[in-house]
Amino acid sequence: MTLLSNTLYDVAIIGAGVAGSYCASVLQKAGYQVCLIEKGRGTGGRASSRRLPMQEEGVQLSCDLGAPFFHATKNQLVDDIQQWLADDVIAPWPAANLAHKGLAYTGTPSMSALTRYLAQHCDLYSSQRISHIDRTDNVWFLRNDSYKTLIKAKRVIITAPAAQTAHLLTSPDAPNAWLQQAHIASRQCAPQWSAVVSDGTEASKSMLSNMPDMLEVDHPVLAKIIHDTAKPGRSTNSAGSSKPTGSSKPSRWVLQANLEWSELHKDSDADEIGVLMLAAFKQLLSEQEDSDLDLTQPELIIATPHLWRLGRHQPSSDVSGKVEEQQAGMLWDPSNGLAVSADWLGAGTVVTAVLSAQQLCQAMIDGDC
């Protein structure tokens, strides 16, 4: 296999999730020649959209099966959020506002719209897995599973989940302390099952009409229920109502399982998981006030669930001290040009991923001034 590019990049970023895409955007604007290498088909990471095995008017549908939105307080990411709002890549979603976390925003027309926007001017190499990194003569070599060099760069930023970062940090050119941090953080990472439910009939639409658009539940199986088609940019109602009226098009609801249940069932068959999650959803519906749902009727359709094996990074005092909500950190060694930026260096949220990337980019730019 030959190099993906003959360019010696100023910065190569492993992972095109929120942190990686943000780093790419900031550094490219600062004059660095930047590339993003992503093992998936496109940008987004945990905030990516997933294709569904269903169509609407001949168009294949997708859904936000990962992070459905993000919360920001009035003092967080003010300039960035205003720019993203002005460029129509995010929109407020009041249905998900939480007093203790701040205002909710979602990407439009999908969560991955934000990372596509951030990465738009950088070289993106998708469906490429970097398994090894090493450094010779001040140049980093990024290699695949077969140890073939794919990219060369002066600096490398790793923005992968902690377990994948730990694998890369086994490089003899990486600080040992970072490897230990990544191992500790990987033990705090929990898998999570997600699935999407579609209301296929008018009867099922009526059943769901009283459901909030975003609901956090204390349930043995489910943790969150999100009305995906009610988000800005998804609704079929041009008037902006959160629940489309007079439309025969189905609505889609994302079910996020709780972490304990997901851990218990992480090796289960996806079809079996779908049956269990749909049954749990129907049970919750039947418990809603004035609900007359007949649990024997197959009026709700569930798509094949997806397991985020590295789904939720839980903050650990072993990683970053006392972690406050939305706190973030980064790792940067200017002597060899290696860095780590990720949500797991903080509270494990979209906002902490951006804050981590902000801190790193500022440190890199200041160091070159």
Image (tube, rainbow, N blue to C red):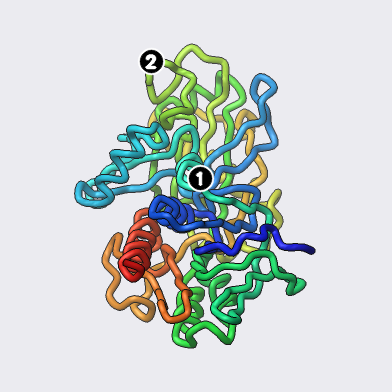
Of the numbered discs 1 and 2, the one sitting upstream in the chain is 1
The residue to which callout 1 is attached is: 121
Q: What residue is rendered at 44% in x and 25% in y?
A: 209
- The amino acid type, in three-letter code, at marker 2 is Ala
Determine whether 295 is above or below 129 in the image. above
**Residue placed furthest toward the right:** 1
Percent x, y for residue 74? 20, 47
For this rendering, which residue is in front, 9 or 235? 9
Question: In 3D space, how far apart are the residues under numbered discs 1 and 2 (Cα atoms)?
Answer: 34 Å
The residue to which callout 2 is attached is: 239
Q: What residue is rendered at 32% in x and 48% in y?
A: 71
- The amino acid type, in three-letter code, at marker 1 is His
Q: Quadrant of the N terminus?
A: bottom right
Percent x, y for residue 359? 32, 64
Q: What residue is rendered at 35% in x and 54% in y?
A: 351
Q: Quadrant of the C terminus?
A: bottom left
For this rendering, which residue is in front, 275 or 181? 181
